Amino acid sequence: MEIRGHIGIGPAVEGIALAAADNFSTRYDLDRDRGIVSRPSHKLFGECYVGRILVLDAAKGGVASAWMLREMVQKKMAPLALLLNDANPVMAQGAAFAQLPLIDRFKTDITVVIATGDRIAVDPAQGLVRILN
Amino acid sequence: MNLNDLEQAMLDGVHGRAAQWAIDYQRSVGTFFDAEDFVPVRLIHMSTDRETMGDAGIAFLEELAAFAPEERRPRAFATADFRGFDEKTFRFLLPDRDLAAQSAEAVAVLGKLGVVTAHAYVNDHSVTAPAFGEACGYSGTPSVVYMNGIVGARCNFEAGPSSLAAFFTGRVPRYGFHLDDARLATHGFRLDFEPKTVVDWGVVGALIGRRLNSYWSVPAIEIAGTRPTILDLNHMALSMASYGSIAMFHVIGVTPEAPDWDAACGGRTLSPETLSQNDLNAFYEEWCGVGEKLNVVVLATPQLDIPEIVWVAELLDGRKVHPDTTLLVYTPIELREACARIGLIQKIEQAGGRVVHGHDFFATFAKEIRETHGWKRLMTHSVKAVNICEGYGYKATPAAIPRCIASAIAGRVLP
């Protein structure tokens, strides 16, 4: 199955999805030292996101993600890629700075069509996601 | 994206390696958002708190600073609200982390690049402010939403590395809130109650932010009763940005691009959703904590202005903060000194409070602070801080300043 989004940022990758109909901020939602989602009210609370393809609804919150994503990538404590229904400038700027794959603006709700555990291929240059299961 | 001759020359490396990196980086972000071209900017504001920059951010700045001056010439005026560190307090908050040294490292490298590391809060207009309609490259979310909504300047979130890039190119990609149509209201709200405090205004911002949940949404709000102050609007704006990534808003009859509904919406018709006292109450109920032992009260985000410091000093006059509760009152260093000259700081400190200057509580490893002190319950008048501190493991209670102070004295969360 193929899902089309807007042309994205970063290199192509393949990996396992961690998905939820919830939003995303590196500062508000993550324990970046332990690599887990730390906000109790988040649908992925307690889940390890390191090396997973995070599939969430919208980017939220402040400017922190733009610096933080690069630090997370360099410390090998980052998700493998980000797929969002709706990115904001901060997330795009952070992804470009970190060279972390990011695609958004899909033709369908990405949090509905991709489930946690799905193996997926992400190709930002084409704005294309494929479910490989 | 279309590049003019100057931008193409930057990309070709004619204007140095910093500009070459910067224009290439900005082009990738601009392409992501379908920007057709760039818009020149005069003013840049950088968010450079040490926690978010991380070692990777500092290392990147140092790489740029190591270039010969002709390889890294700026094309705009940039300030960073790098508000330093209150050594005494931060030694208490985080004894194992040398924040002063880390701060000095960042200030030094930013200074070498030519960034003015001011200690003020940019929304106080204490550094050069943009004009109505002027494109600018501001970084902090509270500053961007303030400049768009309240000043009428034009800005997207130009976060950390993005504002740094704009500093070297003197331009930003033209998309989002640089475009006339994007600034028009997409959603309407009507308040059928009158917010009484800045905390109520913060809750209004949170309610709207949660409902819209998209950077590209622009709320227009019709209010009842007394005209809000700049501080009221600031709390609402930064809360909208925090809970919903909102970067532009209108208040009908108050903000400069919304003299009426028609102007705010560009002639479109919106059906405003009513926000009621019940919505406000339900938000407060979510956090509650009444009767619980209170570990820390944080009055910050935004840091306090002089009238608020006067208020805190009055509320504490002749009283003592409970020995098991820490009271942290944040204000920029210039305001702290002004308040000290008239005895306000001494009054707060005699009562057992700490008046802190420097980076905001949430931007200085707040999770580590909680773990170091074994803190759990936090009170604050900032609805934005409530949102952030939840992610750092605190149980937060939003409340107006008098209730925060009374609770600090009692050592527990008072109703």
Image (cartoon, rainbow, N blue to C red):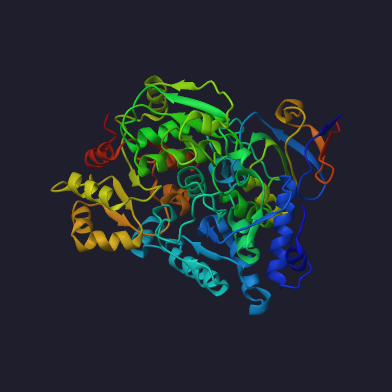
Q: Is residue B199 above or below residue B349?
A: above
Residue appearing at x 43%, y 66% in the figure: B100
Q: Nearest the camera: B233 or B346?
A: B233
| Residue B77 drawn at (x, y percent) | 54, 66
Q: Nearest the camera: B345 or A78?
A: B345
Q: Is residue A108 above or below residue B310?
A: above
Residue A41 visible at all: no
Residue appearing at x 63%, y 42% in the figure: A88
| Residue B379 drawn at (x, y percent) | 35, 39
Q: Nearest the camera: B363 or B88?
A: B363
Q: Total number of numbered labels?
A: 0
Q: Nearest the camera: B24 or A66?
A: B24
Residue sitting at the far left = B318
Residue B99 visible at all: yes
Q: Is residue A12 left or right of residue B192?
A: right
| Residue B236 drawn at (x, y percent) | 43, 38
Residue appearing at x 33%, y 44% in the figure: B297
| Residue B107 drawn at (x, y percent) | 49, 69
Rendered-image quadrant of the C terminus of chain B:
top left
Q: Is residue B373 left or right of residue B173?
A: left
When asked about the image quadrant of residue B266, the answer is top right
